[in-house]
Image (cartoon, helix red, strand yellow):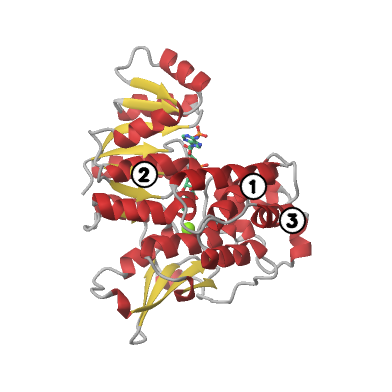
Amino acid sequence: MTKAVSILGSTGSIGKQTLEVCTELGIKVAALTAHSNVELMEQQVRQYHPQLAVLYQLEAALELARRLSDVDVKVVYGLSGVIEAAELPESDTVVTAVVGMIGLQPTLAAVRLGKRVALANKETMVCAGELVMDAAHQYGAEIIPVDSEHSAIFQCLQGCRNRSEVKRMILTCSGGPFFGLSREEMSQKTCADALCHPNWSMGAKITVDCASLMNKGLEYIEAMRLFDVPPEQISVVIHRQSIIHSMVEYRDGAVLAQMGTPDMRLPVRYALTYPNRAISALPPLDLLSCPPLTFQAPDLEAFPCLQMAMMCAKTGGTSCTVLNAANEAAVGRFLREEISFGQIPDLVERALQTVPVISTPALEDILEAEQRARECAER
Ligand code: NDP
Ligand code: MG
């Protein structure tokens, strides 16, 4: 079990819930990092006493250092600061809960030191999953998924001694706020409409990804990388109630599902306590008051982002990096109200058509593909 953590993205939705779990379980907080939220970072440092606090943005870090001049904490900035938090010898586990591909290099740094990585940051797996998993094998690092679907699959795989017995992994998907709409009906939806998720409260970027089903597409690629399964063995099923978090079908026909009330503290807690399970104060799942559980096929025509992600999963290489980077840029533009919801898949498609694919990329190729895709979607 985890003794001390570095939390990358501590001021975000997953980061804050991780801090709650650390308090519950008595886990020491060694380092905290965020982008620029000085206010909340100051509060967190005063409450959790990490030895290192990082803000990515220089001005924000300077302001934080000024405010914390009475506290014994080292304050640094930039990507090198986030990597320093990931590498801190005092933490045995790194929770990567930053949003976006910025999580890649800090995750790799933790993996190369053989640390446990509790991975929420799916963009890292999508962009460079093979590289990260190869490094994890090489350095003996454990990567424990925090994304609820992957945590569910990971839990359903416990006790499986022979992976060839797994026939299929079934990712469940809430369908998001635009479930049942046509592509035309969705195209003019606003930020406020997209930010209204039926079952989960999360950061803005992932909430928009849930509305376009790009989130499920990224999770499809994430599952393929994390569990080393070909895309043909992964399917997606719409399950509006988010009670079943995902399933594994075995070759004898048995289907194992992990169920629970939708609450990210459960997968966070499991990633920190694995292979053990800690007592939790969360309300238990009350099956008798659950709505009926329903399942439907996703509408790939209405949600082209999911379809493009499934195609990239098959193509592999840097196509997944391009998909992710173009989507990050497009969602950023949508959140700044520069483009409509319907333009998100258009920009991703343009980047996929423009940036050439490298099939077995090194880290530099991935970073370059990311840059080119981003530029293409920013135009
Ligand atoms: P939020 O937007 O709520 O939080 C993002 C965090 O990352 C903030 O702490 C932010 O700091 C920090 N951050 C952003 N950019 C940088 C940077 N350049 N350097 C350092 N820190 C940075 O996101 P979520 O918590 O919702 O999501 C985090 C990750 O977890 C995403 O990859 C998401 O896909 C994944 N995830 C989230 C789930 C959820 O329920 N929220 C569920 C499953 C997966 P600041 O506050 O200063 O901007
Ligand atoms: Mg998820």
Pick whichever, 159 or 40, lies toward us: 159
> Disc 1 on helix, strand or loop?
helix
State how far apart marks 1 and 3 are (Cα): 11 Å
In the image, what residue occupies the spot 25% across and 46% down?
114
Q: Earlier in the sequence, mark 3 or mark 2?
A: 2
> Disc 2 on helix, strand or loop?
helix
Q: Position of residue 63 (x, y in %)?
A: 48, 16
Q: Are marks 1 and 2 in contact (CB under 8 Å)?
A: no
What amino acid type should be assigned to the residue bearing mark 2? Leu
Position of 199 with respect to 195 (left or right) is left
State how far apart marks 1 and 2 are (Cα): 25 Å
Q: Which residue is mark 3?
A: 342
Q: Are marks 3 and 2 in contact (CB under 8 Å)?
A: no
Work out which quarter of the rendered image holds the C terminus and state it. top right
In the image, what residue occupies the spot 67% across and 64% down?
304
> Can you see residue 88?
yes
Q: Which residue is mark 1?
A: 331
What amino acid type should be assigned to the residue bearing mark 3? Gly
Q: Position of residue 89 (x, y in %)?
A: 23, 33
In the image, what residue occupies the spot 62% across and 49% down?
326
Q: Position of residue 344 (x, y in %)?
A: 69, 53
> Can you see residue 281?
no
Q: Which residue is mark 2?
A: 108
* Residue 30 picture quarter: top left
* Residue 134 picture quarter: bottom left
Residue 4 drawn above or below residue 267 = above
